[in-house]
Structure formats: C-alpha cells, structure tokens
Amino acid sequence: MKTKNLKIKKMLKKQIRFVCNNEMNSLKPGNVHKYSAGHGMNVKDFIKSGEIISNYLTNNKYNLGKKILNSVIETKKKIRKNTNLGIILMLSPIITVVEKEGILTKKKLLKKIKSLLIKQNTKNSYDIFKAISIATPGGLGFSKKYDVNKLPRISLYKAMEYSKKKDLIAKQYCSGFKDILEVGIPAYDKFYKKWGKVNWALTGVYLTFLKKFNDSHIIRKNGIKIAINVKKQAKKYYNILKNYENMKIIEKKLLFFDKMLKNNEINPGTTADLTVATLLLELVTKKQ
C-alpha cells in the first residue's frame, strides 16, 4: 500500500508540473504564455509556481485546507505575486481525491470531489478563506456577507454556494466541477484530435470557456460589460482556431487578440484556471 501511495504521489507531482508547463506553452489571449508576458508576470513566475504547488498539493499529511493555505503562503513568499490562486483552488480537490481513491473514471472522480467539498467543516474552510485573503485582498468574488478578508466562520460549500452565480470557481466547487467535465473535456478532445498537440488543445479549451462564460476575473477587475464584450470577441477567435488550417495565420490572429486585451489590462485569469484543471482531469482519470 505504501509503495502504491508513493507511486501515485510521484505521478501527481509530475502531472501538476506538466499541466502548469503546458498552460504556459498554449497561446491564451490576454493571459500569460510563452508568446507574451503580461500583467506584471512572466512564464518563469508560473513555471516556478507550478513546481512549488506540486510539492505542497501532494503532501498527504495535509488536509485540503492546509494544502491550499501552504501552497499560497509558499508561492507568495517565493514569487511575491498572485500567480496561481485559482489554479491551486482548482487542482487541490482533484489531487486530494486521487491520492485517496486512486485512478477513477471522470464521473466517479467528480462525484468524490463534490462530496469532499461538501464535507469541509468550518475549521478546514477557515484555512481556505485565509489562503484567498493572503493571495488577493479583493477576495475570490465573495460578497460582503462572506468577505474572506474577515475570515467568515462558515463552511466552504456555503460560501461558494453564495458566490456561484458570479464566480466560476465557486460554481465549480458547488457543481462538482461540472463545467470541466461537460465543457472543458469535450473541447480538449476536439482540439487535440484536430492538432495532435497538447498546447493547441489547451488553446481550444481556453477559447471554448471564454466564449461560453463571462470570466470572473474580468468582471472583478474591469466590469461585467467588458466581460460580456470579451466573451463575444472570443467566439470569433474560437471559430478561427476551429476552422482555419494554417497555424501561422491562426497565431497571428490570436496574438492580435492577445495584444488588444493586454493593452487594455484585461486578463481572463479564471478561464486559464479552468483550462489547467481540464488538462489535469484528463490526465489523472481512466478513459471512459
């Protein structure tokens, strides 16, 4: 049993680094990637952040709350930027369940994830709220009723349920990552089949999420009107990736969108977080 647990831990650590590295290799308009830095961050910041969290998220001595809190504290100490709060929040439940249950089908894994999140008591939830507060003073979209800066004494699920209509990560926590399964995974399969490359499949996942949902980070930083406008524009660039065959032309057009967003300080950060979680879910589950 101990040998099996060590193998799973080693596998998970490797996959965390793999998904974080491949996110940086994918052209995600408005977000940081190898083609373009942005928002005061660069690729090296995210690669290093991925290495940090791979150690803390796979430490099975910690519960979910401690994994998230320690990952945020160490990232802030070594990177001094909020590079990956959303990634930590999205990957940690997947890692925690796989550590305990082993490799499951996607549907079984997500059922276990929802159960894990519902079971988080007030004490464990306190660590997660503290992590969010440390990483970003503006919080994760919680309302004034459950302001994370005041570290509310409630369960994680209750807080997320209150915020799910305006925050995509909160929505995933309440639905058991439903959008990752029903939107992200089909998009990954579709674009991997077309391009045969993980990084371009992730670009497809990213644009699929961006055209379907108003990005939570854009809403908080730039307002709902801009988020809606970005969603409309994303449909155009999604169709380019879907229908064009010439990669150079696609790159040129996506980089134009990328520059336009960054020049206006628009960062679809939550969309990137969902994209990373999609790849991890694909890699650590049984094929259906």
Image: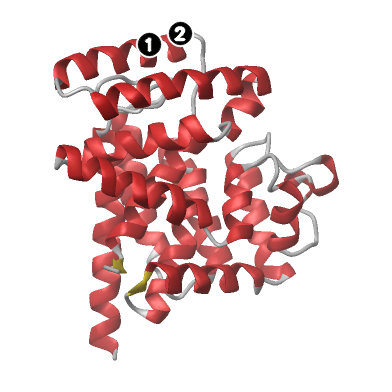
Q: Position of residue 184 (x, y in %)?
A: 40, 47
Q: Which mark is residue 263?
A: 2
Quadrant of the rendered structure where residue 285 is? bottom left
Residue at (49, 28) in percent of width and height: 268
In contact (CB < 8 Å): disc 1 and disc 2: yes
Does 72 sit left or right of 15 as displayed? right
How far apart are labels 1 and 2 at the CA level? 6 Å
Does 127 sit left or right of 54 as displayed? right
Q: Position of residue 180 (x, y in %)?
A: 45, 52
Identify residue type, mark 1.
Lys
> What is the image's colouring?
secondary structure
Q: Position of residue 85 (x, y in %)?
A: 51, 44
Residue at (30, 65) in percent of width and height: 284
How packed is label 2: few (under 14 Cα within 10 Å), some, or many (20 or more)? few
When the figure is inspected, residue 30 is found, relative to residue 45, above or below; the finding is above
Query: Mark 1: which secondary structure?
Result: helix
Identify residue type, mark 2.
Asn
Q: Nearer the viewer, residue 108 or 151?
A: 108
Looking at the image, the residue that sits furthest to the front is 243
Question: Could you tell me which quadrant the N terminus lies in?
Answer: bottom left
